[in-house]
Image: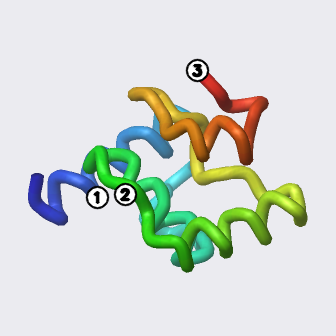
Amino acid sequence: MTINDLMRALVDELIAGDVPDPQYQEFPLALIWFDLCRLAGETPPAAILAVVDDCSALSVPPLVPPLRGSYAEHARQFPEYAD
């Protein structure tokens, strides 16, 4: 997958998740990195998982609920979005 493919898939998920005009929204880069890894089927780096853990403690959800599967780690951090 190319970067454009991943970004297009992420924008499509955001729109499906009722995020208005996702190209104009502000998101923490770590959450975008996390979701792009999920879409690519890759495990995020430990540093990104640590930031996502911090966001979890602040009750900041991932960009959208996982629509195409998720990591076990993602399910542990955000059980409300687990498949």
Q: CA distance from mark 2 to mark 3?
A: 18 Å
Q: Is residue 79 left or right of residue 37?
A: right
Secondary structure at badge 1 equals helix
Residue bearing mark 2: 36
Could you tell me residue 61's position as x and y percent?
Answer: 73, 51
Which residue lies under the disc numbered 1? 7
Q: Is residue 4 above or below residue 75?
A: below
Q: Nearer the viewer, mark 1 or mark 2?
A: 2
Residue carrying label 3: 83
- Give amino acid for label 2: Leu
Tag 2's secondary structure? helix
**As rendered, which of 23 and 29 lies closer to the eye?**
29
Image spot of residue 83 (x, y percent)? 58, 20
The residue under the point 46% across, 54% down is 35
From the viewer's perspective, is residue 24 above or below residue 36? below
In terms of image quadrants, where is residue 60?
bottom right
Name the quadrant containing residue 3. Answer: bottom left
